[in-house]
Image (tube, rainbow, N blue to C red):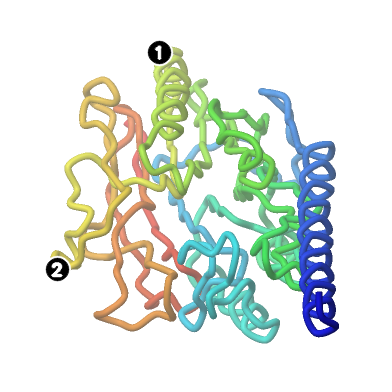
């Protein structure tokens, strides 16, 4: 073998050794990340009593008309000038999409959210994706921000995400999604007699279940002047559930809960981000030229006669976050709405159309009368 051939052989051996070492280090990084996340995985009990923050002298609801606003605030990171890497299939690479919005955009969105909430007074607010301590929202305690915006309200918080480090995009380990702690925040002008977190059934397979939300219901109970209870349910069902298996399990749990409460004579309002359309609503109704797979409707026979889904047919509540929002071009539909029991009558429903300025969802306001 000549000297040149020997040198080339050594170079090739060195190259493959180096390649093998790089692959080994990468696999070790992935393995350590999975072990770390799995050992620290948030595994809540099925039923957890929640602490009420704040107090009010309004212990019993005597008004016959009540108002509620729902809003998935998107942790302040998904305003109209943001896109999101994961909705573009970015498990391995961000593909030029935002892993997290710049801090100035998050601060702008949070400020806009508080201003909009302050301008739209309601008896109750049900918020989703409210961060306590997350890298994506620059570790701002958004529950505290909302409490300062609504100082005369009582709040409760149901955590549904608590991960020390989400290691995606996998091949951009130097700027991964990172720590995430988030949940459902419920605010009321009245003092709740109890606030409870109910864990919903179903979960993605490992390891996805370690890094995705532990879906739950945030339930608040209030005494009514007629001796019954108003049961207010904060909803946020599974996303990225392509065949709907998880949502079906969660909806079956919710059905049993609602029917049982109604049979006691209680009044029920459930509202939030259902991650599916109400019965018979056309998913592409706002943009029939666009076809998006993976979404579907709640079964029209989901609940006994008299229960009603309440929504504003004129206003979309969610947009696609694959790209920055462009009015008339970005796909929009409706997945944020209310469900009320037969002993309630909706007298007003209004989607608050702010062209997705501060979140990828839009708030919805409802007024109901006790029958």
Which sits in the foreground, 315 or 36?
36
Q: Position of residue 293 (x, y in %)?
A: 28, 53
User: Horizontal placement of 66 versus 124: left or right?
Assistant: left
Q: Is residue 165 above or below residue 135?
A: above
| Label 2: how many Cα within 10 Å (few below 14, some 14–19, many 20+) | few
Element marked by disc 1: helix
Q: Position of residue 307 (x, y in %)?
A: 28, 29
Q: Is residue 215 above or below residue 103?
A: above
Residue 263's mark? 1
Residue that badge 2 annotates: 289
The disc, 2 or 1, on the residue closer to the chain's N-terminal end is 1
Which sits in the foreground, 192 or 131?
131
Depth-wise, is mark 2 or mark 1 nearer the camera? 2
Q: Is residue 105 above or below residue 28?
A: below
| Label 1: how many Cα within 10 Å (few below 14, some 14–19, many 20+) | few
Is any atom of residue 43 visible in this view?
yes
Q: Position of residue 59 (x, y in %)?
A: 65, 37
User: Horizontal placement of 133 versus 316: left or right?
Assistant: right
Q: Quadrant of the N terminus?
A: bottom right
Q: Give the alpha-carbon distance from disc 2 to disc 1, as whole Å.
A: 44 Å
Question: Who's the residue at 20% across and 59% down the image?
Answer: 284
Name of the residue lying farthest toward the left: 288
Q: Quadrant of the C terminus?
A: top left
Element marked by disc 2: loop
Which sits in the foreground, 41 or 226?
41
User: Horizontal placement of 135 versus 208: left or right?
Assistant: right
């Amino acid at each position: 073998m000549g000297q040149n051939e020997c040198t080339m052989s050594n170079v090739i051996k060195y190259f493959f050794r180096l390649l093998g070492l790089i692959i080994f280090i990468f696999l070790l990084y992935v393995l350590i990340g999975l072990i770390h996340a799995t050992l620290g995985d948030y595994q809540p009990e099925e039923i957890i009593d929640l602490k009420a923050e704040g107090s009010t002298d309004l212990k019993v609801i005597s008004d016959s008309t009540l108002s509620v606003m729902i809003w998935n605030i998107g942790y302040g990171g998904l305003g109209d000038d943001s896109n999101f890497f994961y909705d573009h299939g970015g498990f391995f690479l961000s593909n030029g999409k935002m892993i997290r919005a710049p801090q100035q955009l998050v601060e702008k969105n949070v400020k806009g959210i508080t201003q909009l909430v302050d301008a739209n007074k309601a008896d109750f607010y049900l918020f989703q994706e409210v961060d306590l301590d997350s890298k994506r929202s620059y570790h701002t305690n958004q529950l505290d921000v909302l409490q300062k915006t609504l100082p005369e309200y009582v709040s409760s918080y149901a955590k549904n995400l608590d991960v020390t480090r989400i290691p995606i995009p996998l091949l951009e380990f130097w700027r991964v999604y990172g720590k995430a702690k988030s949940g459902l925040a419920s605010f009321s002008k009245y003092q709740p007699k109890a606030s409870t977190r109910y864990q919903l059934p179903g979960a993605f397979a490992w390891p996805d279940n370690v890094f995705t939300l532990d879906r739950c219901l945030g339930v608040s109970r209030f005494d009514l002047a007629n001796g019954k209870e108003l049961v207010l349910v904060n909803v946020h069902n599974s996303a990225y559930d392509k065949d709907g298996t998880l949502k079906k399990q969660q909806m079956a749990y919710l059905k049993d809960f609602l029917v049982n409460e109604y049979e006691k004579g209680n009044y029920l309002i459930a509202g939030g981000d259902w991650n599916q359309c109400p019965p018979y609503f056309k998913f592409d109704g706002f943009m029939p030229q666009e076809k998006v797979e993976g979404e579907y409707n709640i079964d029209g026979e989901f609940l006994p006669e008299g229960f009603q889904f309440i929504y504003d047919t004129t206003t979309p509540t969610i947009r696609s976050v694959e790209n920055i929002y462009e009015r008339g071009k970005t796909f929009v539909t409706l997945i944020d709405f209310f469900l009320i029991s037969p002993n309630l009558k909706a007298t007003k429903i209004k989607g608050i159309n702010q062209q997705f300025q501060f979140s990828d969802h839009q708030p919805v306001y409802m007024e109901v009368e006790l029958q």
